[in-house]
Image (spheres, rainbow, N blue to C red):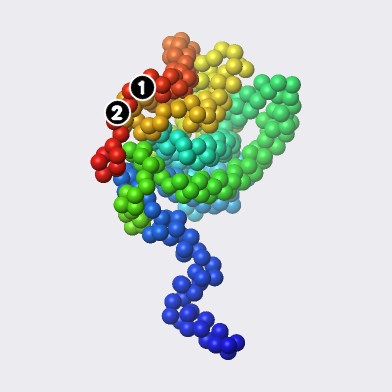
């Protein structure tokens, strides 16, 4: 018997090396069960479901380009700005790598915002996907922290003053706020220790995001994807294999995404940035108007809309943290906004209101802009406050029995 065993293994390797390898390390089986022929997906998913995979691809682009940039960047206040210029001017293909990373950050947030907006519209946060939604919000928070630290690294005027303003917000923490700010700074002002710490964390956090994304996918596979109708699917005929049906769809979506991405990288890489960040950081000269990157602007507008600093900080962080309790605020049994006319109206106003907050956040905090920001902030929180009421009084449309009927 002992002599037959090696012979059987040898035959297995010769006939089907992939199966032999998969028997010992089931990597192929894992892929098939996760995004392959063995993974059942609802057969009525539309292109709005592409944005989950696009977010994963955007994350990979950020990690790869970030690794190459880290090889040439100097986390030193005397060298940081010049090292970025060195990457752009002297490093072979350095301009392309930096543009990919810089524009990639904006596209990453665009994809994630659309992904979250789709979840809000189709009720993907509802039972049994509350944990899936919560993990997604955690990913969003870490993304924001990573992006903020990355914005500081070029050490331009807006980098320096943005870091000063945002880190100072933590001083509102009762009793220990000032000590927390000093600890983050590594001194009594934003300086070299601050830059070094932000660089280390900016390099580390994307890998933390990868780990949490794996948990996100795990939670997704536990109860499968939601679908445009929001119906719970039980019958096998309601599902199709993820591959090739949705891999082809994702590849097409990726092609469209890369066209838009390439146009921005090659023709307008600085369009979404701020011109003051091409001036070396100067602690003695305050910019006329300090603004963060565009993807922070809605929350920045909420911060500035409230004249009391402490309340403004609470409102800004609360505007994100409230997403955690969304599954319990919206108690309607109907998931999809297709069958919820009242919720759908509030949703579209909420989406428009969010865009208004972003626009106001880019304006000086004076005059009519402050008034608009206050109204927009009020509606932002009113939307969530109304959800329990809407769930009780709303007359939903009749749900179809199956997705075929829909």
Residue at 64% across / 44% down in the picture? 200
Residue at 59% across / 16% down in the picture? 311
Pointer 1 residue? 394
**Badge 2, how many Cα within 10 Å: few under 14, some, many 20+?**
few
Quadrant holding the C terminus: top left
| Quadrant of residue 119 within the rendered picture | top left
| Quadrant of residue 156 within the rendered picture | top right
Residue 30 at x, y = what percent?
Answer: 48, 60
Q: Nearer the viewer, residue 109 or 195?
A: 109
Q: CA distance from mark 1 to mark 2?
A: 10 Å
Quadrant holding the N terminus: bottom right
Residue 352 at x, y = what percent?
Answer: 37, 24
Residue at 48% across / 26% down in the picture? 329
Pointer 2 residue? 397
Determine the secondary structure under disc 1.
Answer: loop
Give the residue furthest to the bottom: 3
Determine the secondary structure under disc 2.
Answer: loop
**Badge 1, how many Cα within 10 Å: few under 14, some, many 20+?**
few
Residue 165 at x, y = what percent?
Answer: 60, 24
């Amino acid at each position: 018997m002992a002599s037959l065993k090696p012979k059987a293994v040898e035959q297995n390797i010769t006939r089907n090396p992939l199966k032999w390898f998969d028997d010992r390390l089931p990597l192929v089986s894992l892929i098939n069960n996760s995004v392959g022929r063995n993974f059942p997906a609802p057969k009525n998913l539309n292109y709005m479901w592409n944005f989950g995979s696009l977010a994963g691809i955007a994350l990979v682009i950020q990690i790869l380009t970030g690794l190459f940039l880290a090889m040439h960047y100097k986390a030193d206040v005397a060298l940081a700005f010049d090292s970025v210029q060195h990457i752009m001017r002297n490093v072979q293909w350095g301009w392309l790598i930096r543009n990919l990373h810089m524009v990639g950050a904006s596209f990453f947030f665009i994809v994630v915002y659309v992904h979250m907006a789709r979840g809000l519209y189709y009720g993907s946060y509802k039972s049994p996907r509350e944990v899936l939604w919560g993990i997604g919000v955690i990913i969003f928070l870490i993304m924001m922290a990573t992006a903020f630290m990355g914005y500081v690294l070029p050490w331009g005027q807006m980098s320096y003053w943005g870091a000063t303003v945002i880190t100072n917000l933590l001083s509102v923490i009762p009793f220990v706020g000032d000590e927390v700010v000093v600890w983050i700074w590594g001194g009594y002002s934003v300086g070299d220790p601050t830059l070094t710490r932000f660089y280390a964390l900016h390099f580390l956090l994307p890998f933390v995001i990868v780990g949490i994304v794996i948990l996100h996918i795990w939670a997704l596979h536990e109860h499968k994807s939601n679908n445009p109708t929001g119906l719970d699917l039980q019958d096998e005929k309601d599902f199709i294999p993820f591959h090739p049906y949705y891999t082809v769809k994702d590849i097409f979506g990726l092609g469209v995404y890369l066209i838009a991405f390439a146009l921005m990288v090659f023709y307008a890489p600085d369009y979404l940035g701020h011109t003051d960040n091409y001036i070396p950081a100067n602690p003695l000269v305050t910019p006329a108007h300090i603004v963060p990157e565009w993807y922070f602007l809605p929350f920045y507008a909420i911060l500035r809309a409230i004249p009391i600093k402490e309340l403004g900080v609470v409102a800004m962080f609360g505007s994100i943290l409230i997403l955690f309790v969304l599954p319990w605020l919206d108690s309607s049994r109907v998931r999809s906004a297709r069958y919820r006319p009242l919720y759908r109206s509030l949703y579209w106003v909420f989406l428009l209101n969010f865009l208004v907050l972003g626009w106001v956040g880019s304006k000086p905090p004076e005059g009519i802009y402050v008034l608009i920001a206050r109204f927009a902030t009020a509606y932002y929180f009113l939307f969530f406050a109304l959800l329990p009421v809407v769930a009780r009084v709303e007359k939903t449309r009749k749900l179809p029995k199956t997705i075929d009927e829909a």
